Image: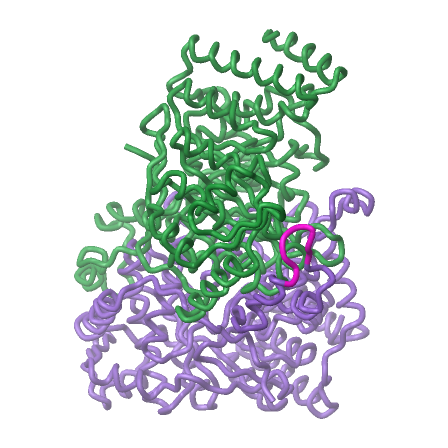
Amino acid sequence: MALRGFLRSFKPFELITEEQVEQIHEGTLDVLANTGAKIYNDEALKVFKKNDCRVDFDEKLVRFPPAVVEECLRICPSSFRVRSRNPDHDLVLGLDHVVFFNFPGRDIVDLTTWESRPPSRKEHIDLVTVLDALPTVHFLNNYPYFGYSGIPENMKEMEGAAIRLAHSTKVTMEIANNDIDRFTFRMAKAIGTEIFANPNTSSPLTCYTDQTNACFLAAEHDLPSMIWDGATAGSTAPASIAGAVIASNAEVIPYIVLLQLLKPGARVAVANLVLPQNMKTGAPAFGDIGVSLHLAAYNQVWRRYGIPMVASSSGVSNSKVIGFQLAYEKTIPSLIAALSGSSAVQIHSSVYGEITAHPVQAILDDDIAHMIGRFVEGIVVSEDSLAVDLINTVGPIPGHFLGQAHTRRWWNREQYVTGSADRLTYPEWKSGGKKNDIEYAKERMEEILSTHTAHPPLTPGEEQEIEKILQEAREYFKKNGYISSSEWQEYMKTLQTEGRA
Amino acid sequence: MAVKGFVRNMKPLDVLTGEQLEEIHSATLHVLRKTGVRFDSTRALELFEKNGCRVNHDTNRVRFPEGLVEECLRKAPSRFHVRARNPENDMVWGGNTTYFQALSGMRTVDLNTWEPRTPTREEYYDAITVLDGLENVSIVPWYTPWFGFKHIPPVMAMPEGLAARLRNTSKFTCAGYSMGCELFNIQMAQAVGAELRTMMAASPPLTFYEETIDAAFRIVEAGFVLLPTSGSVYGGTAPATIAGSLVSGNAEIMAGLVFAQLVRPGTRVIAQDFSFPQNMRTGAPAFGSMEISLHQAAFNQIWHGYGIPTDGGVCYPNSKKIDYQAGYEKAIIATIGALSGTNTIWIQGALYGELAFHPVQAVIDDDIAGMLGRFLQGIEVNDETLAVGVIDEVGPIPGHYLNQPHTRKWWKKEQFIPRASDRLTHPEWLKQGKKDCIAIAKERCEQIRSCHRVSPPLTESQEQDVERIVKEARNFYRKKGLISDIEWENYQKDIASPNYPYG
C-alpha cells in the first residue's frame, strides 16, 4: 500500500508539437555541449572528467557530450517508490499518476490583517499535523515554514526537519544549503524513512558546492533526488519560454548526469520553479500565465525523457490575502500542470510567494487538489454509465432520475463533494450565518488538530536519536561560525522553554 | 472586420478515446430513434413528420431516424460569421477560436454584506458600459447583466434589457424568449443592423415546450443564430453519470439542431453545454463542481467531432462572495473550457449560480479571460525563442539576461499583465494600503464606468426605433393582462423620470 495519487485516464495535454519538443531537446544538448555549466565542486569535476566530459578545472566549467547526457537520461527510472516509516505512506512517483504536496511559506499569515510573522513552534507543528492529515498531501516539501521564532537562521530548517519527521510519516525532503542535509539524512535513517535530496541549481548554469554535495550524499545513502530549478525568465533565463525551458533543462541535467555516474539507476525527479520576471518590481511574477506555459512545455520535454517532473511554480501567487486572485493564480497552473503530465503538483498551504503560508490554506487547497485529481481520473463510459435503457424508461417530462437506483449507485462516484466549500443555497447560507470557505476550513483545522497525530509515533529511542543529531548540528554550525553568540544565547533560552535544553 | 478572438494554437484537450466517442454517439442516436423527444407544438410535429420522423400526435413524441440526424448535423455550418451592431465586433464562431462572454445573474450584490438586491436602471446601464469597456468580453448575452431592474414589470425584463444592451454596447448580444418577447427582440436587432443569438432550451428530460418552439421558429426564420441547450441536472433530470447525461443532453440538443435545419437548412447553430450535477443535499445544481468541467470537455470533443461550434464553460461558482472558493471554481471551469476548445466561454461577472452578478467581478474575471486567451496562443519555438546563442553569450553566473535585447523584445509577449490584480511586492503592498484584487477592480470599474462610451452610439433614428418597439412591447403586454395596474403605475413613473432611458 502506498500513496500513488490520481491515475491519469487520458493522454496529457500537449502545448507544443513533437517536432518542437525535439528542437528544445537539441537546443538543450547544444547548450550543455558548447556553453556548459559551472560546477563548483572539485570531486564532481573529477567524476565528470573521468566520464568523457570536457572539464576546465580552473574555470570550473564542464561541457557535456550529448551521448553522455542522453545515456544518463535514459537510465533514470520513470517510476519509483520512496519508503516511509509508515509503509502506507510510501510515495510512488511516476508518469501515469499525479500526486500533490505543499508549497512552503517563510512566515505564518494573520487571517485578519494579512500581515506576516514568524510562526511559533506550536504553529509549525500544527501546520505539519494538518499536512499529515490531508488526503491529497502525498508527501511534504521541506520547511513548511522557515523554522520558527527564537532559533538561528541556520538551524531553522533543521528544527523544521525534526518536526516533520516527528509529526508526519509522509515522505519529505531536505535542502542542501550549508550541508544541512548531512544531518537530516542521518535523522531520517535513524527512524527508518527515506527522504529526497534536494540539489538546487543557481541560474544561470551554475551548481554550487553544497548543492552538488547533495548528489554525493544521495548516492552514498541511496536516496532519491528532487532537483529544483528556479530560474527567472527575463533575468536569469531567457525571456522566451522556449529558451527558458532549454536553460532550465541545461541546469538540472548536470545533477542528473552526476547522480547517474555515481549510482546508475538513481531515482530522480525534476522540479520546475521557473517564474517570469516582473519587470516593474524586480520580483518574480508569481501567478503569471507564463508559469503555466512554461510548465506545459517543460512537462512535455521531460515526459519525452521519461523522468518524473514536479510542478513547483504552480504553488505560488502574488496575492497577499486568501481570496479570489490567490485562487485563480494557483488553480490555473496547478490544473494545467496536472493535465500536461506533471507527476507531482505543489499547491497546498502557500499564500503569497514563498513568504506566507497557513494550515487553513492547506485545507482549502485540499479541495482543489481533489477536484483536479477527479478530473484526471476521467469519465467512465460503459453500458451502465451510458444508461440508455434508463433514459428510455424515464422518458420525457414528467419523468425524472431522482428516484432511480442508478442515481443512488452512481452520483457519489461521479461527484467529488468539497470538504471546505460553501455548497448551500442562498436561504440556507443566510440562515446559517453566511459562512464562507475560510470559516469551513478553520473548523476543519480545529478538528484535525484536536484528533490527528502521526501514525505511528516516534519511539522514545527515535526521538532521542533525532535530538542527538540536532545537538551535533547545533555544535557543528556554532563551531563553524554559522551561529553567533547572541543567536546561541537566544537559541538556548528557546530550547529551555521547550524543555529541550 | 471581425474581432479575432483567441486562436488556440495547439490540439485541444481530449478526455475521451475514439471508441468512447463512438459509444456515446451511438447511444445518442439510439435514444433519438427509440425513446424520442417530446415537442409540444403541432406545427413542429408536422414538420418532423413531413421529413421522415415517426410522430405520435397523442404523446407529442418524435422519434428520429439516424440518417436524418446525421444529415442535419452535416448541414449545420462548422464555422460562421455573426454580426454585431459595430462590424468591428463581429465574430467568427467555430474551429479553434475562443471568445469570452459575460455571465449574468438575477440580481446585484452588496460587496460588503454579500446580500443580493434588485439593481436600479442606472446600475443596469452602467454595468453594460463596464462590459463594453472590458477588453476580453466579446459577447454581452441575454439577461446580462441582470434579470431586469427596479420598477419594470417582470414581463418587460427581456425587451428593456435588450434595449439597454443595444444602447450601451456595440458588441454582439443575445436575447432570450418569454411570453413571445422574441417578436420585439428580433425587430429591435433588425432596426440597428445587429444579429441575435437565442437559445432553444429543452426542458429535460427530453421535452420542448410550445413557447420554446414558437420562439425557435421565429429566430430561425429571421435568419439568426440558434443555441440549442439542455440545462439538465445529472441525477435529477438526466442520468447521474456524466456519460449518461451527455447522451440524454445531446439527444435534446440534436433534436433542436434537426428542428433548425428542417425549418431553414444551413441555420447557424451553436451547441451549448449548460448542465450541472445535482447537489444531493440541497436539491440545487452543484455549481462550481469539477464534474461540470469533465462534462464540458467531453461535450466539446463530441460536438467538435460533429463539426458544430460549442458554447459553455459556464463559470457559475457556488460561493456567494468574491472569495477563494469562487476563484478556484471559476478558474477550473474556464481553464478546462479553454483547453478543450469551447468556442464561447461564459465567465465575466457572475457570482453565486445564476443568482448574482457584479461589474467588479466582471473586471476581475476579465483578467482570467486574458490569461487563458494568452495560454491558448501557445509559445513560439524557433531559433530566436530557443535562444541558444543568447544562452551561450550570457553563460553561467555572473551572466544575466536583464540587459539583453532579446529580453526587451520577448518578455512582454510571453507574459500577460492583468489589470485588476495585486502584483506588488510585500513592502509596496503594505505601503499602498494592502489592496486586494477587489479593491483594485473597484477602481478600474469606476474608471471604465466614468470614462468609457459605446462606439458608435445609436443614431437618432435607431434610438427612436428601439424606443418605439419597447413601447409596443409595453402596450402589448399591458393589453394581454401581463402587467398589473400597480406595476404599470410604477413603470410609467420610471419612464417619466428625467434622463430616461438611462435613469
In this picture, which residue range is highlighted in magenta?
B393-400
Please provide percent x and percent y for residue B241: 28, 55
Q: Looking at the magenta stretch, what is its main secondary structure?
A: loop
Q: Drawn colour of chain A?
A: green
Please provide percent x and percent y for residue B134: 67, 70
Name the foreground residue: A266 vs A499: A266
Kindly indicate which chain is depicted in purple in the rendered structure. B
Please provide percent x and percent y for residue B292: 41, 57
Image quadrant in which you'd find residue A418:
top left
Name the foreground residue: B413 vs A482: A482
Magenta region includes residue B200: no
Image quadrant in which you'd find residue A351:
top right
B93 displayed left or right of A204: left
In the image, residue B313 sits, relative to residue A7, either above or below, namely below
In the image, residue A19 sits, relative to residue B95, either above or below, namely above
B488 displayed left or right of A2: right
Q: Residue at x 49, y 43 (%)?
A: A227
Which quadrant is the C terminus of chain A positioned in? top right
In the image, residue A160 sits, relative to residue A331, either above or below, namely above
In the image, residue B474 sits, relative to residue B14, either above or below, namely below
| Residue B489 can be seen in this image | no
Name the foreground residue: A47 vs B94: A47
Name the foreground residue: A465 vs B291: A465
Please provide percent x and percent y for residue B286: 43, 51
Which quadrant is the N terminus of chain A positioned in? top left
Q: How is the image coloured?
A: by chain
